[in-house]
Amino acid sequence: MPVFEYTCKNCDVGFEEILVNSEDIKNFFEKHKCPVCNKWAKRQPVSAVNFTFKSSTPGNSGSHDLDYPTLDKAVGRSSEKKWGKINDRKAARDKVRKESGTNSITQIGNKMMPTSPEKLAVRQKAFETLREVSKKS
């Protein structure tokens, strides 16, 4: 039920009124008679809202952790697995870089290896060609 707060400027009293039907809300939405001095008191802006999500249907508590605990766990497991693969690949690249002393790595399938000098020469030629083309543009 809507609870409206009012403050009387005449006697400086604050009070609340529960307005149930639409006719009362229409008549007393902006002002209401003060219970102390019986003069008109002005409605105050909404100060707090008091409601909760309660239902017998699952998924309506208002808290994602309570409504979907298995989904969160599945997402957590999935992300752990994905990050595990990413971190394993990074560790393999770092190991090859450290052992070979180069940052140029080639991956064939799941195997990481230093890039061959022939492949490095092809890459270097491609970068030089790209630089020349971009200078002309």
Image: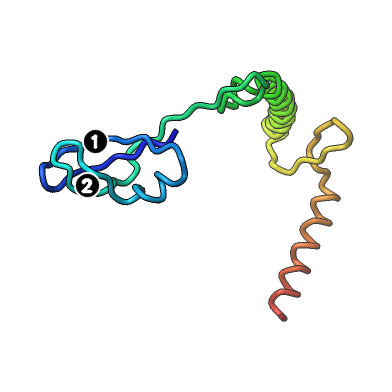
Q: Which mark is residue 41?
A: 2
Comparing 17 with 73, the one in front is 17
As helix, strand or loop, the secondary structure at mark 2 comes to strand
Q: Where is residue 107? Give x, y as percent.
A: 83, 38
Q: Amino acid at mark 1?
A: Phe
Q: Amino acid at mark 2?
A: Ala
Q: Where is residue 53? Give x, y as percent.
A: 55, 27
The reply, left or right, for residue 37 in relation to residue 47 is: left
As helix, strand or loop, the secondary structure at mark 1 comes to strand
Comparing 28 with 65, the one in front is 28
Residues at badges 1 and 2 in contact (C-beta under 8 Å)? Answer: yes
Residue at horizontal 62 percent and vertical 26 percent from the top: 60
Residue farthest to the left, as pictured: 11
As displayed, is residue 33 above or below residue 67? below
| Quadrant of the rendered image containing residue 16 | top left
Instruction: For marks 1 and 2, give the CA distance.
Output: 9 Å
Q: Where is residue 127? Give x, y as percent.
A: 75, 62
As displayed, is residue 118 above or below residue 2? below
| Quadrant of the rendered image containing residue 94 | top right
Residue farthest to the right, as pictured: 109
Q: Identify the mark nearer the N-term, 1 or 2.
A: 1
Q: Which mark is residue 15?
A: 1
